[in-house]
C-alpha cells in the first residue's frame, strides 16, 4: 500500500478509526477503575495539515474537513463530540491546521488514573513521538515492532483497556499478521478490547480476513465499515473497516447512529455506504 500517514492524515479512514477509538475509550471511562490503551503502530502523534504532504493529497478536506464543517443529527453529534473536541482543542480558530493521530486522541481523552502505551518502530517517528509526550507520566513510548507488542505487552497491569492495531499495510501479509497477533493477544488477555483498522482494497484479502475473524474463536466482535464511493478496483482506497473484538456493549448501537451521518457527509455523492456486522 506504500502508506505514509502524513499524506493521508484526517482522511475518511482516520475519521472512522478515531470515532470508534473515542467511543471505546468513553465506554471504559464509565467505571472509575484505571485502564490502559496500547497503540501498536502509533506514528508521530499529530499531523500538520498545512504540510506539503497533506496539501499534496488534500484528503483531509473530504474527511475531517467535511465533518467539522457541516451539521449532523444531534444524536450523532453528541456521540462524536469527544473526538471532535480533541480536534478543536488542537486548532485555535476556524481553520483546520492540525490533526491528532491516535496517540493524541487517546491522551486527550484519558483521566488522571489512565495510561497510554504508544509503540512505534520507525526511528525518526519514534523520536518525534517521544519528544511530543516528553515529561508526560501517563504516556510511555516504546521503540518496538508493534506486532511483538501483542504478545509482550498484554495484559497490562491495569487488566482493563484497549489495544489499537493500525499497521501501515506496506507488506502483503499484514492481514495474516493481524490475525496471528490477535490470536496470541486474546489468549493472554481475554478481557481486553482489540480494535483493528484495515483498508478495503483487495477484496479477496478482506474476505479472508473477515472469515478468519469468524473462525478464530476470538470471542464476540463487531465489524464496522465505511465506503466513500462504489468499488473502483484494488489500486484505490474506496473504503476501510474497524474490526473490534470484545467491543463495548454500546458500540454497535452507537455506530448505527453515527455512521449514516458520517457516511453521508464523507461520501463523494452524499450516499451513506456503511455496514455494521457482528461476528
Image (spheres, helix red, strand yellow):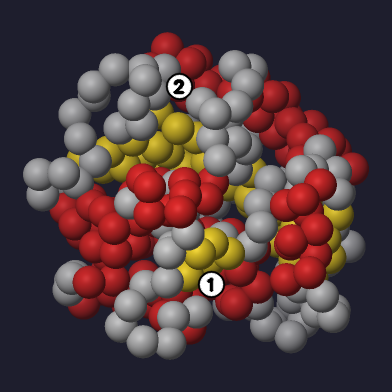
Where residue 206 is drawn, which disc sits there?
Answer: 2
Residue 219, horizontal then vertical, whole percent: 61, 37
Residue 1, horizontal then vertical, whole percent: 51, 26
Residue 143, horizontal then vertical, whole percent: 86, 49
Q: Is residue 144 left or right of residue 183?
A: right
Rendered residue at 81%/38% (across/down): 145
Q: Is residue 200 above or below residue 13?
A: above
- Residue 241 appears in the picture as rendered: yes
Alpha carbons under labels 1 and 2: distance apart: 29 Å
Query: Dot 1 lies on which element?
Result: helix
Residue 27, horizontal then vertical, whole percent: 54, 69
Q: Is residue 125 left or right of residue 174?
A: right
- Residue 214 appears in the picture as rendered: no
Rendered residue at 52%/50% (across/down): 6
Rendered residue at 42%/12% (across/down): 204
Q: Nearer the viewer, residue 50 or 78?
A: 50
Q: Is residue 230 above or below residue 176?
A: below
Q: Is residue 122 above or below residue 183?
A: below
Rendered residue at 19%/29% (across/down): 230
Amino acid at each position: 500500500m506504500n502508506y505514509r500517514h502524513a499524506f493521508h492524515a484526517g482522511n475518511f479512514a482516520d475519521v472512522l478509526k478515531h470515532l470508534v477509538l473515542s467511543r471505546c475509550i468513553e465506554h471504559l471511562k464509565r467505571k472509575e477503575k484505571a485502564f490502559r490503551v496500547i497503540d501498536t503502530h502509533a506514528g508521530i502523534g499529530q499531523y500538520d495539515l498545512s504540510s506539503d504532504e497533506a496539501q499534496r493529497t488534500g484528503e483531509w478536506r473530504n474527511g475531517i474537513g467535511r465533518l467539522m464543517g457541516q451539521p449532523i443529527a444531534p444524536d450523532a453529534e453528541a456521540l462524536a463530540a469527544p473526538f471532535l473536541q480533541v480536534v478543536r482543542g488542537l486548532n485555535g480558530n476556524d481553520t483546520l491546521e492540525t490533526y491528532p493521530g491516535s496517540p493524541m486522541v487517546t491522551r486527550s481523552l484519558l483521566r488522571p488514573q489512565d495510561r497510554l502505551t504508544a509503540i512505534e518502530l520507525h526511528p525518526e517517528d519514534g523520536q518525534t513521538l517521544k519528544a511530543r509526550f516528553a515529561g508526560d507520566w501517563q504516556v510511555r513510548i516504546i521503540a518496538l515492532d508493534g506486532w511483538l507488542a501483542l504478545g509482550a505487552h498484554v495484559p497490562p497491569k491495569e487488566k482493563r483497556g484497549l489495544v489499537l492495531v493500525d499497521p501501515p499495510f506496506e507488506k502483503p501479509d499484514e492481514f495474516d499478521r493481524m490475525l496471528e497477533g490477535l490470536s496470541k493477544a486474546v489468549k493472554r488477555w481475554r478481557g481486553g478490547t482489540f480494535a483493528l483498522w484495515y483498508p478495503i482494497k483487495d477484496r479477496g484479502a478482506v474476505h479472508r480476513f473477515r472469515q478468519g475473524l469468524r473462525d478464530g474463536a476470538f470471542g464476540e466482535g463487531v465489524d464496522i465499515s465505511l465506503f466513500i464511493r462504489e468499488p473502483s478496483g484494488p489500486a484505490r482506497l474506496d473504503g476501510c473497516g474497524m474490526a473490534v473484538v470484545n467491543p463495548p456493549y454500546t458500540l454497535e448501537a452507537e455506530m448505527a447512529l453515527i455512521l449514516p451521518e458520517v457516511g453521508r457527509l464523507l461520501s463523494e455523492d452524499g450516499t451513506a455506504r456503511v455496514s455494521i456486522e457482528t461476528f
